[in-house]
Amino acid sequence: MSLAKRLKRFGLDYYLFLLLGTVVLATLLPASGLGAEIVDQVAYYAVALLFFLYGAKLNTSAIVAGIANWRLQGLVFIFTYVMFPLCGLALAAVLSPWIEEELAIGIVYLSILPSTVQSSIAFTSIARGNVPAAVCAASLSNILGVFLTPALVAMLLHASGDGISLQSLLDIGLQILAPFVAGQVLRPLVGGFISKHGLMTQVVDRGSILIIVYSAFSAGVIAGIWEEVGPTSLTIILLANGLLLAVVMMATWWAGRAAGLDPADRFTLLFCGSKKSLASGLPMANILFAGQAVSMIILPLMLFHQIQLFVCAIIAQRAGHLASERELQAAMLPADARA
């Protein structure tokens, strides 16, 4: 088995090392002055292109079909925008005496973000979950997040001390929602091409995140982030993120069982209701926390992103393997026994 396949089995791939390498690069060679402005502009348009591709790939009929499963979609919404924020607030309150204020803000911020798109759908598919419902849940989560995340930031964090301005909402809408809608409108023309070239979306997805991380950490290094965040704070954030993910994942699974969802829908709830989007979170943080220590605020999100990929990959692979074994055993039964 190749190294890449071994890493992928445990939720790790070369992207993780690229992400870490980007932080190291920003630490050693931070962008400043005109260079920082150029990086910011490239990041802005890369994110806009990413959400255009999301819109062009999304089959609208999948959303319509998914909405019919209102119990599942309602539970995903509740965990994403109610239960997760409550857990984040509680965790930040407990940890605030031991970590920097910006890191506590970052814990709350990651808890009010929408779900991921690509990885939620991918893990649901691997686990033999309800993929159409996952497409619906992840897409709706990100569309609603354009409005709900800024509203929750204003309500819970009072960003910039004055709440969230109309201009911030317009900026987020122009960078994320408008390209998404444009992609949907142009889907009949470009959807087929984009669907056949999935690697293009992945490159833009990961590339835009790397650029934003480089930009944010460049600003952070210049402002002295590594002088403020020590090993103790990083360890606390890692453990807190692991605890937060474990609590939410267990809660989603048991809530799905209590609601009478079948196993396929429970896996959809598990992956869509417990994951948080780095692709949406980074650009929104740059807008919502302009003038603040963005690199410190997004640090909990970056660490949570890696933990969720690692944990969800293991669970999805295990669930998919068990499903394959059950199918094989069923196929080996005599016809009358299967009947």
Image (spheres, rainbow, N blue to C red):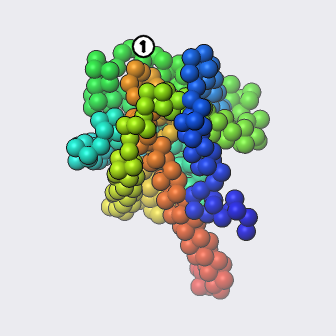
Q: Is residue 14 visible?
A: yes
Point 31% across, 38% down: residue: 100
Point 53% across, 29% down: residue: 218
Q: Quadrant of the C terminus?
A: bottom right
> What is the x, y in percent for residue 294?
43, 29
Of 318 and 205, nearer the camera is: 205
Above/below status of 272 relative to 28: below
Of 301 and 251, nearer the camera is: 301
Dot 1 amino acid type: Gln
Horizontal relation, residue 326 to residue 167: left or right: right
- Would you name the residue on which mark 1 appears? 167
Point 40% across, 37% down: residue: 227
Of 251 and 231, nearer the camera is: 231
> What is the x, y in percent for residue 180?
58, 27
Above/below status of 304 relative to 218: below
Above/below status of 138 relative to 245: above
How many numbered markers are drawn? 1
Point 43% across, 38% down: residue: 226
Q: Quadrant of the N terminus?
A: bottom right
Quadrant location of residue 18? Answer: top right
Above/below status of 235 relative to 174: below
> What is the x, y in percent for residue 246?
37, 58
Horizontal relation, residue 318 to residue 113: left or right: right
Q: Is residue 73 visible?
A: no
